[in-house]
Image: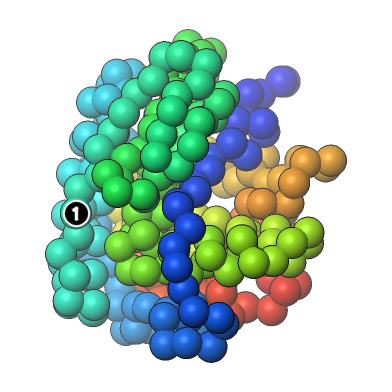
Amino acid sequence: MKRPWAAVALLVAAISVLYRLPANGGPEWTVLADPVFPASVQLLPAHCGEPVTKDMKAFGERMLDCLASVWGPVVQQTDGLVMRRPDVVVYWTAEIPTRCGVVRDTTAYYCGAGAEVIYLSGPAFRRLFSAWPADSRSYATLVLAHEYGHHLQNQLGIMKVSTTRQSRLSGAAAEEESRRRELQASCWAAAFLGADRVALGPGFASRWRSLLSRTGDLPGTPRLHGSVASNRYWAQLGFADARPGSCRTFTATRAMVE
Ligand SMILES: [Zn+2]
């Protein structure tokens, strides 16, 4: 049976503006080597489950309530930061100008430059909800949790260092940097979902694993998000015990972020 996810899942993207940073080795760069979250930190359940709406603005806002309730206290305790709330913008055009550049045909996109915004494609989600109503809510839940992972990276200073480093690399090395960032966001998303597994219900885990089996860079496309195997590895790691400190993709070996 033909499913829409394979291509859609690959379009989850995040770009931030490039910042002025000293050459590799300055104190700003240690953020990528830090565990960020201590191993002892385990996320508490949000008691939210999947929002029951096809209105993606309402879906996104509900998810932000849930995500903030879990991540806010953790970030404040571990890093002393107060999490800001990103905006949710649902766009219905083929492309939309953002502070991170023009976004085209992208299901979900986080821009952390200035105003922090999660962009969601109205037509893409409408098609998904029409064709696969049950699975689509799980997919949308997963997408919002992933984009919030980028928001965490943005507030914690990871985004600017990683995107700057990527801009100074080229070819396979630049793509590897992107994968480390994307896989960390997915791992953190999975930790959030794993903590809330009771509210998400018994069917969620199987739908989530099915989505994972189709989430990865397609052959012939830039290797920016990671292979199916890498996505599955980091997602399962995060989901298993809801410990975001396990998501150390920036210090993992290259083979673990293929
Ligand atoms: Zn992403």
Question: Label 1 is placed on what type of residue?
Answer: Arg
Q: Picture coordinates of residue 250 (x, y %)?
A: 56, 74
Residue at the far right: name it.
220
Quarter occupied by residue 4: top right
Q: Picture coordinates of residue 131 (x, y %)?
A: 53, 13
Secondary structure beneath disc 1? loop
Q: Is residue 82 left or right of residue 189?
A: left
Q: Picture coordinates of residue 173 (x, y %)?
A: 74, 66
Front residue of this view, candidates 122 and 241: 122
Which residue occupies 19% across, 59% down? 83
Q: Is residue 98 left or right of residue 124?
A: left
Question: Where does the C terminus fall, quadrant-wise?
Answer: bottom right
Question: Taking the image as drawn, is residue 234 in sight?
Answer: no
Figure check: 153 above or below 21: above
Figure check: 212 above or below 124: below
- Residue holding disc 1: 84
Q: Is residue 5 left or right of residue 148?
A: right
Front residue of this view, candidates 121 and 246: 121
Question: Taking the image as drawn, is residue 158 in sight?
Answer: yes
Which residue occupies 19% across, 54% down? 84
Which residue occupies 72% across, 74% down? 254
Which residue occupies 58% across, 69% down? 165
Circle 1 Cα neighbour tier, 10 Å, few/some/many (<14 / 14–19 / ≥20): few
Q: How many marks?
A: 1
Quarter occupied by residue 50: top left
Figure check: 108 above or below 216: above
Front residue of this view, candidates 153 and 69: 153
Front residue of this view, candidates 103 and 7: 103
Question: Where does the N terminus fall, quadrant-wise?
Answer: top right
